[in-house]
Image: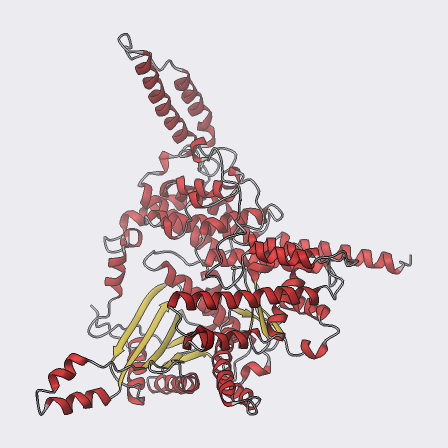
Amino acid sequence: MKLNSSALLTFLLFSFFISNGQEFKNNYTPLRSEGEVPLELKKLSAEKYELRKESFKKDARKMRKTKEELVLQSTFAIDELLLSGDVLFNDTIGKYVNKVADELLKNNPALRSKLNFYIVKSSYINAFTTERGAIFLSLGLISKLNNEAELAFILSHEIIHYQENHILNGYIETSKIKKEKGKYKGQSIKEKLLSRSNYSKDLELEADNKGFHLFTKSPYNPAAAISAMEVLKYGSYPFEDIAFDYSFLTHSLYSFPNSYRLDTIQTIDSEEDYDDSESTHPNIRKRKEQLKELVTDSSNTAFFIVSESSFNHVREICRFEVLNNFTSDRDYGMAIYHNYLLQQDYPDNLFLKTNLGYLLYGLARYKSNKNQLSVLRKYSKEQGEFQQLLYLLNRLNDEELAAIAVDYLYRLHTTNPSNPFIEKIMLDAFRTLIHDEEKSINYYVTKSEIEAILTKNAEEMLADPYANIDTTNYSERQKAKLAREVRRQQKKKEEKVQFDQFVFAEVLTEPKFDSIFKLITAEVENISSDEKSYFEISKENSIRKRKRTKFGVSLNADKIVLADPYYSKIDERKEIQTKYIKSEKKQLSFRESVYENAERLELEVEVLGKKKSVKSDINRLNEISISNTWLEERANHDYIKIIPYNYQFMKPLSDSYGTNYFAWMGLLNARLKTEFNPTAFFVSLFSIYGLPFYLTSLLTPDYATYYYAIVVNVETSEVLIEENNYLSTRDNNDLVQSQIYDTFFQIKRKKDYTK
């Protein structure tokens, strides 16, 4: 049968929706950059800066200098962001965003050719423009949008920032305010802040105004500009607000006590007419009022032009990615609610199930260390249905959470026995539970025992609370008080029986569960007092364990992977303190010193290079992203002994390199500002010898050099080497070489001098 064009289009769209749904139905793989790194990004930042300077030659001297300052700072900052691993290249989201930009600027190809749109892996609601035409949008922003038209308006706003030179104009105006030029002469610090804020707000309103006119040249519905403001207004809330079902974290044989539930929750009431006097952006009400004046009757009604199905697909990817970010950033409460929202559509998704298992485990570990405030927001400060979940998570104690985590992860492990990450966090959840509760397996009840316990409990609840108490001489008030106390005790007992003992009712009789429980129990009972710090660790103990000894450490390692070394030179005497060009040259030199010292010690070092590296391809950028995300999470956990969430992504990377040792190192050198000391000068005047010495010290430049090195075992997450060396000297070659050599020597050395 031959299909007509309309029927064929309908069929193709239906097929696309089905395939997209199938993509998320069973699993999800986190986004990575694809294809080739743009050739322009492989150039040194200094080269690009010198090329940009050529275009300013005909400008007046002051304007040329201002432009050079801005371009110098922005070129290096943008390149650092683009090559940090936090920006995606050639990905599904970026390709779609660029298609929307093509639609907006299809009648202005010259302007379109100057713009590049990138996606930043951030859960924050943000979009920003740079003076060289790189426009960045966050995953968090796209995850909250309702349609393609809202995205198009936001892009229009950012395009105007570039087209109208707002970045340069803002830089020039800020410089005038700082130097008190013209109308800003004599302003106080407070007045300067207000002047900068007012000027910035004017630029934002102009971008809204002119952006709207650009936006309405396309077939998009003008109303989307106003609804985009609503997205910004509610940006700090979850992408949906639906009631949290407590059964999401339980099973059919137990439930949470009623006291773990808020009677009322605060409805979402986001203020739009807030005080913006010191903000860079006008408040939402002002922006909406301006846009409403611009909206007129229009024949443009499209909310989608490129593709509605593509928009929905891209937004769903963003929501999965934002969940990843919430978990890595240890915002566990928000992550669980986000997971709950996604599981409404994808209840069988393994990525979501694994993520939830980790979040329960992570909360249990933090509660075990009495540090839940680091990963849980205060429920009293939140609004909407999310507040109900936060209240529950705050009420659950460490023992209860550990039991829930064990039950959930054990079930997940039985259906996914070959998943090493699930097994690893499951076993650690068992350790947390058994150490915290110090209860034997006999404490918990089986499914067959539940009915007898509930029957007995019900009989106790029905018993007369005054049966064994002589209340003859009690007043009515005393009787009422006694009744309330008895009911409180009975309710407490009922809640404990219904919840605590029933968690493992469905799995307790399984031989594998019994075997794991007994195995971990024996492990916990047999560990030494030193090893018990795994559970009872404190910040002081952690710092003491990692303190460098006289001889350093001895890892006896033959190979490490090193993230691209960091190097920065600063001159505190200058207005622009960072010496960007020299820093870049020194970074390349530092890398060569790494290879030289590694060869000298016969230590194999793989550098995750960025610029001017043969292997500086898209895979290396993905590796940098994975390793830096893992390290940041590991650093944020600080002294909490926990398996990082990003271990599941970092471990395959370490396996591919054939080593568990990953290192981060760098050096910061500063030319310090010499301060005039009037007291010392006055004292020196009374000595014929003192003045020359004082003048010599005043004219001799002061330098400070800070060198750091961190070596971590990916498998155990243990920090093995932590060097923080502060030296009052220049960063001469001998110093740099000696610092690198010392670190590598400890990595390579066999004999352990720390014992």
In front of the other: 657 or 481: 481
Q: Nearer the viewer, residue 215 or 421?
A: 215
In the image, residue 530 sits, relative to residue 461, either above or below, namely below
Identified at 39% across, 47% down, the residue is 364
Q: Residue furthest left?
A: 687
Q: Position of residue 358 (x, y in %)?
A: 46, 52
Q: Please say if 288 is above or below 97.
A: above
Can the viewer see residue 145 in this picture? no
Q: Quadrant of the N terminus?
A: bottom right
Q: Which residue corresponds to the image point at 70% horizontal and 66% vertical from the top-left?
A: 213
Q: Position of residue 473 (x, y in %)?
A: 26, 8
Task: Determine the residue positioned at 43% across, 83% down.
Answer: 580
Name the outermost residue toward the top.
472
Is 376 left, or right, of 478 in this rendering? right
Question: Do we see residue 281 in this rendering?
Answer: yes
Q: Nearer the viewer, residue 751 or 115?
A: 115
Image coordinates for residue 252, horizontal then vertical, percent? 52, 34
Which residue is drawn at the image coordinates 50% and 85% (left, top)?
68
Toward the viewer: 704 or 575?
A: 575
